[in-house]
């Protein structure tokens, strides 16, 4: 595969977002501006939470931070890479290497063991099978799931699934762990365990983590709270001013858990692309890394192959 050089500027920042605007077109002549010009930076090693009411734009922002979508205008650098100048084809590689996604509904691949789920990003990154296996086992140990390595997702509890998902997110030693309501589908005790795991990764491995949550108490445990409302950042509090976010901004998370919280990708991606819109983030986070032309159906929206 011919690699293309990607220009990287090292600023010590994992996220540099400047005047991010996101507009959705909802049919002529209407357009809906959802993010109204957000600017913020996240330095390497910070554990940040993003909070805000339902509909305030958190997931829309996450899609941009996660390089799953581009801003309509504004600048976004992920670990020094100018995302707005990056081709779709390179974006999936960047996502696979730079970002570990964790979702509310886990998004493990069904009928695939915990171990193989964790191996997936390593496969896409081109590791040999023995190296994949070795590293995936090590990652499962980190999340205390080594004993369940051979289990299928439907044989795991919610908290166990999320631990596997976190191990998978860590597979390629990403620059950023991006978690959208990772405890939203879990009871408080299990959510606590997941949160403790994030703390461990942050403290012991210096991971940069962006946590999107409705949970005020969990947010208060992080280094910094960014509060968004109606597509704007309304407060950005560091450790010294934790009490900034008003409690009424937090609502219980909706829990749209489907069957077992698993997306079944064994049923091949539909050629008609019918479901592409609603599951963009989840699908792209586990399939974006789709490495080869061999198994994958044609990518729906790509420019012509240029490898
Ligand atoms: N593809 C789209 N087309 C049009 N509007 C959209 C689209 N995606 C999101 N929106 C709108 O953008 C707004 C923000 O949505 P978003 O999913 O980012 O909210 P959220 O803060 O993540 O909410 P929740 O806490 O419920 O997950 C909503 O009003 C939503 O209807
Ligand atoms: Mg959301």
Image: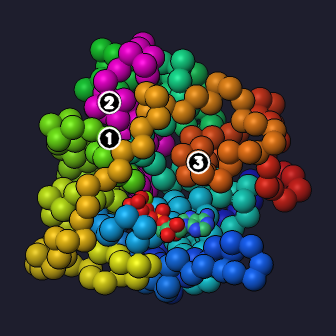
* Magenta-colored span: 150-178
Q: Any magenta on residue 169?
A: yes
Q: Position of residue 296 (x, y in %)?
A: 76, 34
- Quadrant location, ligand no. 2: bottom left
Which residue occupies the foreground of this view, 59 or 138?
59
Which residue occupies the foreground of this view, 67 or 56?
56
Using a 10 Å C-alpha cutoff, classify the residue at mark 2 as few (fewer than 14 neighbours), some (14 to 19) or many (20 or more). Answer: many
Q: Are marks 2 and 1 in contact (CB under 8 Å)?
A: yes
Dot 3 falls on a residue whose secondary structure is loop
Q: Any magenta on residue 120?
A: no
Using a 10 Å C-alpha cutoff, classify the residue at mark 3 as few (fewer than 14 neighbours), some (14 to 19) or many (20 or more). Answer: few
Q: Which residue is identified by label 3?
A: 279
Q: In the rendered view, does 82 fall on the left or right side of 178?
A: right
Q: Is residue 285 above or below residue 24?
A: above
Q: Earlier in the sequence, mark 3 or mark 1?
A: 1
Which residue occupies the foreground of this view, 11 or 119?
119
Q: Which mark is residue 185?
A: 1
Dot 1 falls on a residue whose secondary structure is loop
Q: Which mark is residue 158?
A: 2
Q: Are marks 3 and 1 in contact (CB under 8 Å)?
A: no
Q: Which residue lies at the image location 25% right of the left edge and 71% below the top edge?
A: 249
- Residues under labels 2 and 3: Cα distance? 20 Å
- Quadrant showing the N terminus: top right
**For the residue with label 3, is its CB less than 8 Å from the closest atom of ligand 1?**
no
């Amino acid at each position: 595969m011919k690699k293309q050089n990607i220009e990287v500027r090292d600023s010590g920042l994992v996220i540099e977002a400047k005047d991010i605007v996101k507009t959705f077109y909802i049919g002529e002549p209407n357009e809906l501006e959802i993010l109204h010009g957000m600017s913020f930076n996240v330095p390497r090693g910070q554990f940040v939470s993003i909070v805000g009411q339902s509909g305030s734009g958190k997931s829309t922002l996450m899609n941009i931070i996660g390089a799953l979508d581009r801003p309509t205008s504004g600048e976004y650098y992920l670990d020094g890479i100018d995302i707005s100048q990056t081709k779709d084809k390179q974006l999936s590689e960047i996502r696979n290497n730079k970002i570990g996604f964790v979702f509310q509904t886990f998004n493990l691949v069904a009928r695939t063991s915990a171990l193989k789920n964790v191996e997936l990003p390593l496969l896409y990154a081109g590791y040999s099978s023995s190296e994949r296996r070795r590293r995936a086992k090590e990652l499962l140990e980190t999340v205390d799931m080594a004993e369940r390595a051979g289990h299928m997702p439907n044989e795991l509890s919610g908290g166990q699934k999320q631990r596997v998902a976190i191990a998978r997110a860590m597979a390629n030693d990403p620059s950023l762990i991006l978690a959208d309501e990772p405890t939203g589908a879990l009871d408080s005790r299990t959510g606590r365990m997941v949160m403790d795991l994030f703390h461990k990764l942050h403290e012991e491995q210096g991971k940069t983590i962006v946590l999107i949550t409705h949970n005020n108490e969990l947010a208060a445990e992080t280094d910094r709270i960014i509060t968004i409302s109606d597509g704007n950042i309304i407060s950005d509090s560091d450790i010294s001013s934790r009490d900034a976010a008003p409690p009424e901004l937090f609502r219980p998370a909706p829990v749209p858990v489907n069957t077992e919280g698993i997306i079944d990708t064994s049923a091949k991606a539909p050629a008609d692309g019918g479901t592409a819109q609603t599951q963009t983030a989840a699908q792209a986070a586990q399939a974006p890394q789709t490495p080869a032309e061999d198994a994958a159906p044609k990518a729906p929206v790509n420019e012509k192959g240029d490898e």
